[in-house]
C-alpha cells in the first residue's frame, strides 16, 4: 500500500469542445482541483486557460506546471513527482478529454504505480467513448488505432487491413484525425472500405456543432459530407 505521507496522483479530465466547461465538467473535478497546486500538462498555456475558466483558484500564478508530452523521458519523472513525495497532490491534465487515453499521461501514471503512489481517475468527457456509445457499433469488442498514415496509398492499405481485422473479430475500429484533414480522411475511408461496412463519423462531441451519424460506407460515398475543421472520431465495423 502507498505511504500515507505521500500525495496522490489525480487524472483530471478537460473539455473536448471549447466553452463547454459548465456543461461537461462535473463537481467532483472542481472539488479535486481545489486540493492540487502541482500539474503535469502538455501545454502550459492551454492548461492555465482551462483552470482559469473554472474560477476555483484565487491566483493561477501560484500553480506549478511541468510539461509532460510525447517527448518526455523516463528520467524526468523523478523530478516531476518530488511534490508527491513531500505530501502534495499532483494532477495530470490532457489537452483534450481524459489523461492517459490517446494521451501521453500514461507514462506518469505507470511511474506512480511503480512508486506505490495512489492514482485517482476522475470521470469526465472522452471523445473516444462518447463516439463509441453514439455509434451503434460493437461496444463489446473494439480497438483504438490513433491516426491513419498521411500518405494516401498507405492510408488505403491500413484501412483495408483494419477492415479485415474488424470482420474477423467483429471488432469496431476507432481512430482520430487532425481537424484540417477530416474531409480527406472521409475520402480515404469511402474509397477503401467495402460498401456494406458500417462507418460512423462523430464531430465536435459535446459542442455546439456536434454531429454523429452511422451508415454504410456506400451511402456516405453517394452523399459525401463536408466536415468542419473540428475534432473528429471515425469508427467502422465490417
Image: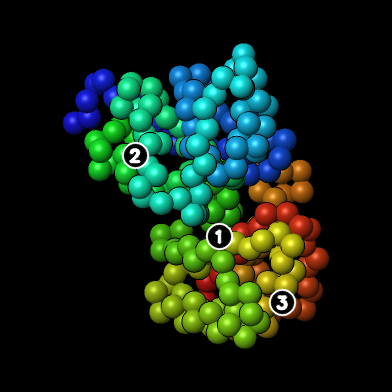
Relative side of 80 to 26, left or right: left
Q: Nearer the viewer, mark 3 or mark 1?
A: 3
Mark 1 burial class by Cα count in 10 Å: few <14, some 14-19, many 20+: some
Q: Nearer the viewer, mark 2 or mark 3?
A: 2
Marks 3 and 1 close (CB-CB < 8 Å): no
Q: Is residue 228 visible?
A: yes
Residue, disc 3: 187
Element under label 3? helix
**Counting residues from the N terminus, which is met first, the one under dot 3 or under dot 1?**
1
x 61%, y 70%: residue? 199
**Counting residues from the N terminus, which is met first, the one under dot 2 or under dot 1?**
2
Q: CA distance from mark 2 to mark 1?
A: 43 Å
Mark 3 burial class by Cα count in 10 Å: few <14, some 14-19, many 20+: some
Q: CA distance from mark 2 to mark 3?
A: 45 Å
Residue, disc 2: 78
**Counting residues from the N terminus, which is met first, the one under dot 2 or under dot 3?**
2
x 32%, y 44%: residue? 111
Q: Nearer the viewer, mark 2 or mark 1?
A: 2
Element under label 2? helix
Mark 2 burial class by Cα count in 10 Å: few <14, some 14-19, many 20+: some
Residue, disc 1: 136
Quadrant of the rendered structure where residue 119 is?
A: top left
Residue 221's place in the image compared with 233, above or below, is below
Q: CA distance from mark 3 to mark 1?
A: 22 Å
* Circle number at residue 58: none
Provide residue 210's location: percent of width, then percent of height.
Answer: 72, 49
Provide residue 143's location: percent of width, then percent of height.
Answer: 45, 64
Amino acid at each position: 500500500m502507498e505511504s500515507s505521507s505521500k500525495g496522490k496522483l489525480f487524472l483530471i479530465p478537460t473539455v473536448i469542445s471549447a466553452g463547454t466547461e459548465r456543461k461537461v465538467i462535473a463537481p467532483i473535478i472542481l472539488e479535486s482541483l481545489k486540493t492540487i497546486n502541482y500539474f503535469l500538462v502538455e501545454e502550459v498555456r492551454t492548461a492555465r486557460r482551462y483552470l482559469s475558466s473554472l474560477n476555483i483558484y484565487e491566483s493561477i500564478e501560484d500553480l506549478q506546471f511541468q510539461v509532460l508530452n510525447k517527448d518526455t523521458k523516463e528520467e524526468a519523472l523523478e523530478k516531476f513527482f518530488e511534490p508527491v513525495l513531500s505530501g502534495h497532490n499532483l494532477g495530470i491534465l490532457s489537452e483534450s478529454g481524459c489523461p492517459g487515453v490517446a494521451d501521453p499521461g500514461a507514462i506518469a501514471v505507470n511511474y506512480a504505480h511503480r512508486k506505490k503512489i495512489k492514482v485517482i481517475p476522475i470521470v469526465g468527457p472522452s471523445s473516444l467513448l462518447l463516439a463509441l456509445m453514439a455509434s451503434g457499433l460493437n461496444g463489446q469488442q473494439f480497438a483504438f488505432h490513433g491516426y491513419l498514415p498521411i500518405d494516401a496509398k498507405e492510408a488505403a492499405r491500413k484501412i483495408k487491413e483494419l477492415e479485415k481485422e474488424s470482420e474477423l473479430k467483429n471488432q469496431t475500429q476507432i481512430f482520430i484525425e487532425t481537424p484540417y484533414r477530416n474531409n480527406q480522411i472521409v475520402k480515404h475511408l469511402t474509397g477503401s472500405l467495402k460498401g456494406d461496412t458500417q462507418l460512423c463519423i462523430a464531430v465536435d462531441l459535446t459542442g455546439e456543432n456536434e454531429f454523429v451519424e452511422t451508415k454504410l460506407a456506400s451511402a456516405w460515398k453517394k452523399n459525401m459530407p463536408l466536415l468542419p475543421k473540428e475534432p473528429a472520431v471515425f469508427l467502422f465495423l465490417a
